[in-house]
């Protein structure tokens, strides 16, 4: 008999998992605190956005979802002190796009509406206050007294996962000591469907293309003190500062939307498969630094691999069913957290020695086209590391 699945968290990863499992014939109980809200800033674009890989688009297309998006076919990476720079082009891997920048709230709304329309997904609003798991079932206790029982529990409730807290699951923290400043800006020149990223000593600054050719989403990692200072700048001073920080790669930055700052973290749960009937995915499993835009794509990789396993086994609580999945996904998480931490440290090295090291490395990387192509393929979620057999 097909398992009944309870999914806690109806964000991008949880809602996608619900629709994908429902498509395979599983009955899904989706639990979320409240419906998503559509957010648009003063420049008409949601300040929160995600960079989606081709693999993530394939997954979303498989459940009939794809929102308005801005594609990028080129990425340019350079740094504050060095003269070398990296350029990635979709033509290097025989593709039209490297990825897409998608507004978060419209995509969340589309997924939510699809869950509402699905006959195999039932949505419950409420807060989880307790979890009881036995050899026969998992029960979720809500604040209003309601109890949901299921054969299998999937936790997709984000970086501050309630499920992880209630189960007292330990995490491994990798210190970041940075915040991210997010906003949307209007630029003098067109963004050219290019993702621009400059590594400053204090942290990386990314300009990500929006559907409007003169609008870019900004994700700017920096120290908490600098982030607080930039939040207090008036718009004129902020525009001057970000124009200088980007070396006016798109001309003068002419307008800025509301600015928000949020703390950055890198963490991973020690055991994402703590019980035969419980599995953690997405940010509930791991949180990575946003400098490579991999966070939600790793979560979508989880869903893709999850559905492959579920397609072969109707009983999702079958003993040790998820052991291999957990081992592979946690290894992938450790590798990404370690790589992003290394990049942050390398680009944070000041002085002539650090500059020489980076420029030598960039030159060597550019001289190895086969390695460069493989790195791009993995970043797009199309390589063997992101989708093992």
Image: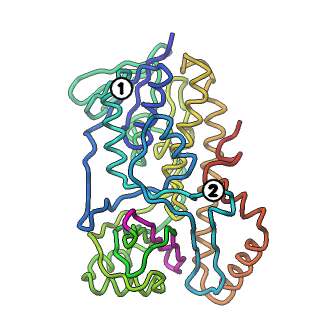
Report the magenta residues as a range: 195-212
Q: Residue furthest left?
A: 144
Residue 106, how many percent across, how many down? 33, 49
The residue shown at (33%, 79%) is: 230
Task: Provide the secondary structure element on which disc 1 rests.
Answer: loop
Q: Residue furthest top?
A: 1
Sequence order check, earlier mark of 2 and 1: 2
Where residue 179 sits, quadrant-wise, is bottom left
- Residue 152: give x, y in percent of width and height: 47, 23
Number of residues whose C-alpha sits closer than 10 Å to that of mark 1, classed few (under 14), some (14–19) or many (20 or more): some
How are the colours assigned in the image?
rainbow
The residue at which mark 1 appears reads as 118
For the residues labelled 2 and 1, the Cα–Cα distance comes to 33 Å
Magenta-colored stretch includes residue 205: yes
Q: x, y (%) of residue 231?
A: 29, 75
Question: What's the residue at 56%, 32% (across, down)?
Answer: 306
Label 2 sits on a secondary structure element that is loop
Magenta-span inclusion, residue 303: no
Between disc 2 and disc 1, the foreground one is: 2
- Residue 95 circle label: 2
* Picture residue at 30% right of the left edge, 32% below the top: 129
Quarter that holds the C terminus: top right
Residue in the picture at 64% in, 46% down = 386
Residue 241: x and y in percent read 38, 85
Q: Residue 153 versus residue 16: which sits nearer the camera?
A: 16
């Amino acid at each position: 008999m097909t398992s009944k699945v309870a999914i806690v968290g109806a964000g991008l990863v949880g809602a996608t998992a619900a629709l994908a499992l429902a498509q395979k014939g599983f009955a899904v109980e989706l639990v979320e605190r409240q419906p998503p809200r559509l957010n648009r800033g003063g420049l008409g674009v949601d300040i929160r956005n995600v960079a989606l890989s081709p693999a993530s688009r394939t997954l979303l297309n498989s459940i009939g979802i794809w929102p308005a998006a801005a594609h990028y076919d080129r990425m340019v990476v350079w740094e504050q002190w060095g003269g070398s720079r990296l350029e990635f082009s979709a033509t290097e891997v025989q593709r039209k796009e490297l990825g897409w920048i998608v507004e978060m709230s419209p995509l969340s709304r589309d997924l939510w509406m699809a869950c509402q329309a699905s006959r195999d997904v039932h949505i419950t609003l409420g807060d989880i206050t307790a979890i009881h798991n036995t050899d026969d079932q998992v029960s979720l206790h809500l604040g209003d007294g309601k109890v949901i029982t299921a054969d299998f529990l999937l936790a997709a409730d984000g970086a501050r996962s309630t499920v992880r807290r209630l189960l007292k699951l330990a995490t491994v923290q990798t210190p970041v000591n940075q915040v991210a400043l997010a906003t949307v800006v209007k630029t003098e020149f067109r963004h050219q469907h290019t993702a621009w990223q400059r590594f400053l000593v204090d942290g990386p600054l990314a300009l990500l293309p929006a559907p409007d050719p003169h609008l870019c989403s900004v994700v700017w990692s920096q120290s908490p003190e600098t982030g607080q200072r930039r939040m207090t700048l008036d718009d004129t001073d902020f525009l001057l500062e970000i124009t200088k920080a980007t070396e006016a790669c798109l001309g003068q930055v002419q307008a800025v939307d509301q600015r928000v700052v949020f703390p950055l973290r890198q963490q991973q749960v020690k055991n994402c498969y703590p019980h035969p009937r419980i599995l953690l995915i997405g940010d509930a499993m791991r949180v990575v630094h946003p400098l490579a835009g991999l966070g939600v794509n790793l979560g979508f990789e989880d869903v893709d691999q999850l559905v492959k396993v579920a397609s072969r086994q109707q009983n999702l609580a079958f003993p040790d069913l998820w052991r291999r999945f957990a081992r592979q996904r946690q290894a992938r998480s450790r590798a990404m957290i370690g790589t992003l931490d290394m990049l942050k440290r390398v680009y944070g090295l000041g002085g002539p020695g650090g500059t020489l090291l980076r420029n030598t490395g960039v030159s060597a990387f550019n001289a190895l086209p086969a390695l460069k192509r493989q790195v791009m393929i993995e970043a797009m979620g199309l390589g063997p590391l992101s989708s093992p057999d």
